[in-house]
Every structure is written in C-alpha cells, then in structure tokens.
Amino acid sequence: MPRLADTVEALLRRATEDARRRRHAAVGAEHLLRAAAMEEAGRSLLRALGVDVLALVNDLEAYLSEHAPRRRPWQFGLWSDRVLRRTLARALAHAQASEQEVVHLGGLLAALYDPALLAPGEQAPWAVQLLCLHGVSRLALLHYIAHGIRPGTLPLPVALGPGPQRVVLHNDAYTTMEFVVAIAERVLGHSTEEAYELMLQVHRQGRAVAGIYPAMEAQDRARRILHLAMEAGYPLLCTLEPA
C-alpha cells in the first residue's frame, strides 16, 4: 500500500496544530496549504509554479481568520474536514493505481484539484480557488510534478533538422492508459493491438518511440498529440528526436 511522505505527514501535523490554535472546528485543505507555504519544501514547489508565496499566505490568513468554521462550546476534539479526507483518500488511491509507493506534496495538491472530489453542483474548495487565482491551474501543476515543466514553458515540438524524426511519448502518473491508446490510434495511425503495445512500452520503460516520420509530418503529429492532451486535461509529453 502507498503511504504519505514523511514531509506530508509533518505538514498534516502542523496544519492540525494550526487549526487547534485557532480553535477551528476541523482541519481543512487551507490549513494544509498554509503549512506548506511556511515550510521550505512547500515554498520551493509553490515558487516553481509561479506563486507569490507571501501573497498566498496573506490570502490564506484572511480566509482562516474570517471564514473557517470555529469550534462550538460543546465540540470536543479535532478532525479532518470532508474535503481533506477525500483528498488524502484520492491521493493514496491514485498512487496505488499508478504503482507509486509514496505520495508527496505535489501528488496531494493534484488530488485536491480532482473534480471527482466534488458533489454535483459543488464548488471547488477555497484552497483550489485560491491557487487558481494565483495562476496555478491543475494542468500546470500536473506538468510540473510529472515532467518538471514550469508553467508557461511547455516546449512545442520542433523538428530537429530536415531528416526523419522520431515521435517520442513520455510516461506520467496522470495520463490514462486508454488516452495513450486512443492517441496512438487516432493521431499516429496504429492498429488497436499496436497502440496497446506502445502504451505498455511507455508505461514500463518511461518513454517509447511512437513512430518515425518526415520532419514536418512528425512535428505536426506531435503538436496534435500535445493539443489533444491539453484539451483532455492530461500532462502527456510528446517530443521529437532525429531518427
């Protein structure tokens, strides 16, 4: 079974201490986000995503001071609110499905964005709304934690020379296997059996050559793959190499 990273466990403890100090009714995702912003590892992740950490902390302080539910006189103990409980469960389930042993902060934040957490008509938690206001979309977060690509720097595939080019697909923990198979069939022209074998190679080896094409055709196919992945909300990475 996957487990939470020690750093995430420590952040949850700090978030709980913060909620207790403020006499809040429960520990929420906002407490966790504030705890992350106060620690170097969390600050580094947020800065890499283009966040003004001080401004984010100020916004979190305003929310926690004015809007977080406070404990009633008859309430005892402190627990995680529904959003945080679902986020932790979702992050651990995703880690198990994608064969990861440890859930790090990036994976936990990605689970917080997951629309499956929300009931019909329910708004995204304030922590997610706040991150979006600070320019961190779900896809930007996934591109960074999956491939180390910072927001606004996703490279467009460019043919490297006039000769034939390899179209290379890169593995990540968030693009579904079904989507990779569909891309291989729809954009690269593989049969269903070939597409499935390609998907397995990407998954097992971390990357795979999906095809070799003339330079401009390879560039066109790679860009279509990236476009379709972004439309679907997946961080699938496709690059070109000289054949």
Image (cartoon, rainbow, N blue to C red):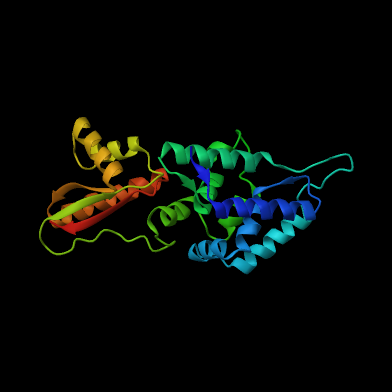
Residue that appears at 20% across and 42% down: 188
| Residue in the foreground of this view, choosing between 2 and 23 | 2
203 up-or-down from 146: above or below: above
Quarter containing the C terminus: bottom left
Residue at image coords 45%, 37%: 96
Residue 111: x percent and y percent? 53, 44
Left or right: residue 56 compared with residue 196 = right
**Residue farthest to the left, as pictured:** 163
Q: Is residue 155 visible?
A: yes
Task: Give how far across and how far down residue 187 sits, in percent.
Answer: 24, 42
Q: Is residue 202 left or right of residue 17?
A: left
In front here: 19 or 164? 19
Task: Look at the image and tell me whether residue 31 can be seen.
Answer: no
Image location of residue 172, percent across then percent down: 36, 47
Q: Position of residue 114 (x, y in %)?
A: 52, 42
Residue 120: quadrant of the picture: top right
Furthest residue toward top: 193
Residue reaching furthest right?
73
Number of numbered discs: 0
The residue positioned 56% from the left and 55% from the top of the image is 7
Of the pair 158 and 173, the residue shown nearer to us: 173
